[in-house]
Image (tube, rainbow, N blue to C red):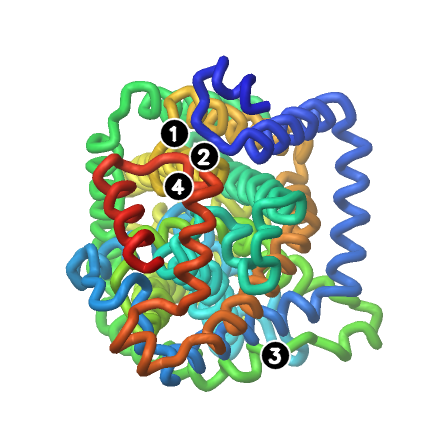
Amino acid sequence: MESLARRLGLRTQPTIFFVSAGLMILILALLLVFPAQLGEAFGSGREWVVTNLGWYFIFGVTAWLVMLLVVAFGPYGEIVLGDKDQKPEYSFFSWFTMLFAGGIGTVLMFWGVAEPISHFTTPPKAGVEAYTPEAATDAMNFSLYHLSLHTWAIFALPGLAFAYFIHRYKLPARVSSVFYPLLKERIYGPIGRAIDIIAILGTLFGVAVSIGLGTSQIGAGLNALFGWENGTTLQVLVIVVLTTVAVGSIVAGLDKGIKFLSNLNIGMAIGLMIFIFLAGGMTLFLTRQLFETLGAYLTALPGLALWNDALARETGDGWGWQGGWTVFYWAWTVSWAPFMGIFLARISRGRTIRQFVLGVLFAPSLFTLIWFVVFGWSAMRIDGMDGAEGPISAAVAESVPLAMFEFFSHYPLTTILQGLAVIIVALFFATSADSSSLVVDMLCTGDGEAGPVRQRMFWGISQGALAALLIVLAGEEGLTALQQVITVVGLPMFTLMFLAGISLLVALRKERLRFVTEVVGVPQEAKEAGTDALERGEIVHQSAEGEAARREALESER
């Protein structure tokens, strides 16, 4: 495999790259040849996972959130993610804005109106009447439960583990590295390679599902603007066009351009939110709701965090609601964990564990709160809380992706707002596809640098092809099929991240706090791990200056 990699001009860990690529191509072929059979298999798999292991997902994410807060506020919170006296690479403001940027995207654009309205229409808990103020409050609580602190706990756990083992142990930027305390040198053997391959495939599926959701919303926007039918053909065409844009940026090396577009995209999203806040005649109502919603969410959070709807099975409802919402969300989000973990680790070198955890959990969650208050409460008030279905609820019942565009029809400049929403989602799609192909490539190479263009092109095209085939496989029941796929794929990823948290706790227990943070900087085990990784050639690329500095440091430690 090494000779093949050299002949192809690749710079990667051959086993991880070629096995991941081979399995990716095999999955694409199977999706193309056996769509109906695979659809049935994923449907059966999802039913089994939700019925038997739904509690595992719900308990797990809550446990991660509690663990992160305990570590942050305990003595280990003082540990620096790097060497002794390591200074943060970014100012606090720059770091905060990058976390802030990570807090919005196609997910909030898709669900900002659709989720509160969905729960408003069909209350999750028994005894709550739909289309009432009580249903609206519950709807907002569940929306925030799904997309604020708990979601960011799923990102923060692998992000902290990555940052700790990459910056402190000097290990490769791979998922297997976080299992060093449990596996030691076996992270470079078959077990470690298998972990990395599972993580890469899970990440590709997670990104593909997000692309599928974003594409369905773009299609709904084009339908609202031009009357085009939002069917499989249009959605696949959208994927092809935007994947071509993303791959084109990889080929052209337009890193600065992508950064500019990302910043522009964030600015447009914030501008859209401010317009809705000011233009709907509900500014005072939304201001009051901002504080009231925060209080209601924090009050309801303990109950929501452990709610399993256990008695529903006695009435024959099974796990219907939570399986389609909470379990799906956690399975989907954890499939993004390696992608977001690498990103968070890269920007957090030099931060303390306390700074990392509190920043990653609370900065994006605060923005999510504001976003849902502005869009969710505005939508429910427009719909009416008099016990009867309103126009936005009717649109969501017809098609979830239509929610945002029906919502905009109740504001001035409707066409401009709908067009802007399509552009925002499309740009999020293109920039996410580009950056996720970079991260998947990094998971193969094991370093923090971009590989050759052809490697990133391969992953970018693969993501688009997988998303397109999932759309074709899904057919008319698109959202349901995507939920089935990601729930099944998310189970092994969820288990990996659960074990990663245990591995991180094992490593932290070996830290002698005063000695480590004030005298030496890193534990002896960390020095040995970094030396071993360098000697094995597992860190396949560094700048000449960085490699020389690291070798000098390792020699001095000996």
Q: Are marks 1 and 3 in contact (CB under 8 Å)?
A: no
Task: For marks 3 and 4, give the CA distance.
Answer: 38 Å
Q: Earlier in the sequence, mark 2 or mark 4?
A: 2
The residue that appears at 49% across and 47% down in the rendered structure is 174
Vertical arrangement, residue 221 with respect to residue 485, above or below = above
* Image quadrant containing the N terminus: top right
Disc 3 designates what residue?
306
Disc 4 designates what residue?
447
Decide if residue 18 is on the left or right side of residue 92.
right
- Select label 1 or label 3 by which is in front: 1
Q: Earlier in the sequence, mark 1 or mark 3?
A: 3
Nearest the viewer among 336 and 342 is 342
Q: Amino acid at mark 4?
A: Asp
In terms of secondary structure, where does tag 1 sit? Answer: loop
Q: Alpha-carbon neighbours of circle 4 within 10 Å: few (<14), some, or many (≥20)?
A: many
Q: Amino acid at mark 1?
A: Gly
Q: Earlier in the sequence, mark 3 or mark 2?
A: 3
The residue that appears at 67% across and 77% down in the rendered structure is 126
Vertical arrangement, residue 156 with respect to residue 195, above or below = below
Q: Alpha-carbon neighbours of circle 1 within 10 Å: few (<14), some, or many (≥20)?
A: some
Task: For marks 4 and 1, give the CA distance.
Answer: 9 Å
Q: Which mark is residue 441?
A: 2
Q: Amino acid at mark 3?
A: Leu
Q: Are marks 3 and 2 in contact (CB under 8 Å)?
A: no
In terms of secondary structure, where does tag 3 sit? Answer: helix
- Residue 156 occupies quadrant: bottom left
Disc 1 designates what residue?
451
Task: For marks 3 and 2, give the CA distance.
Answer: 37 Å
- Residue 481 occupies quadrant: top right
Q: Are marks 3 and 4 in contact (CB under 8 Å)?
A: no
Q: Amino acid at mark 2?
A: Asp
Task: For marks 1 and 3, give the CA distance.
Answer: 43 Å
